[in-house]
Image (cartoon, rainbow, N blue to C red):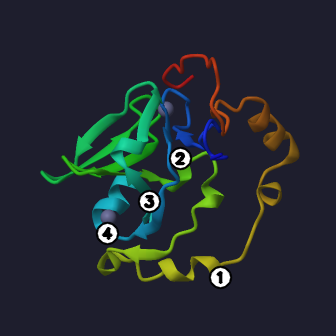
Amino acid sequence: MDTEEGMMAETYSGGCQCGAIRYRFTEKPSGAHVCHCRMCQKAFGAFYAPLVGGLRASFEVTRGEIATFRSSDQAERGFCANCGTPLTFSYIDGKHMSVSIGSLDDPEAFPPVDQHGVEGRLSWANAIGSLPDRPTTEQEEPETAAFIASTNHQHPDRDTDTWPHPRRNA
Ligand SMILES: [Zn+2]
Ligand SMILES: [Zn+2]
């Protein structure tokens, strides 16, 4: 007897900060990497883009609709139009869909295995890991941290049955 048969397949879910968009992969995404190219820096507003992906056939949006920007005639970048979270990267008509590792519910499970677009790497990007460490509790007053926690509008790192429709700037 096939013990896999009938078992609920494990899924790998994620979504945007406000919760308007939720997605999942039905197979574990692979090939986690960071891309240092200038287009990824701009699209993520960051030093590099952390991406991992899988077949489009294993990817589905389970809540909302991903807005897209064609960053070239080759590629499309998806984001939440409500909160701005960068979510996807794909080649137009390609079979592959990549997502931002930070938007997955369990980013810890996707350590990068290589770096792409290194011609665009910022000269100090490699040194970030050796900068002084400061936890949030050292930077925020306890009252400020408590206020932020009690007014947190970020969607939890799991699927939810209901979630208040996020209003702009709510
Ligand atoms: Zn959102
Ligand atoms: Zn890139």
Residue 108 lies, with reference to residue 59, above or below; the image says below
Disc 4 and disc 3: Cα gap in Å?
12 Å
Name the front one of labels 4 and 3. Answer: 3
Residue type indicated by callout 3: Leu
Q: Which residue is mark 3?
A: 51
Task: State the mark number for residue 130.
Answer: 1
**Image position, residue 154 (x, y; %):** 63, 34
Which tag, 3 or 1, sits closer to the chain's start? Answer: 3
- Residue occupied by mark 4: 37
Question: For the residue with label 4, is its CB less than 8 Å from the closest atom of ligand 2?
Answer: yes
The residue pinned by badge 2 equals 103
Name the mark nearer the viewer: 2 or 1: 2
Nearest the eye: 73 or 30? 30
Q: How many marks?
A: 4
- Judge whether 164 appears above or below 159 on screen: above
Badge 3: few (under 14), some or many (20 or more) residues near its Cα, within 10 Å?
Answer: many
Q: Amino acid at mark 2?
A: Ser
Mark 3 or mark 2, earlier in chain:
3
SS class of the residue under badge 4?
A: loop
Q: Nearer the viewer, residue 24 or 69?
A: 24
Q: CA distance from mark 2 to mark 1?
A: 25 Å
Kind of residue sitting beneath label 4: Cys
* One can see residue 103 in this view: yes
Q: CA distance from mark 3 to mark 2?
A: 10 Å
Amino acid found under the numbered disc labelled 1: Ser
Q: Earlier in the sequence, mark 2 or mark 4?
A: 4
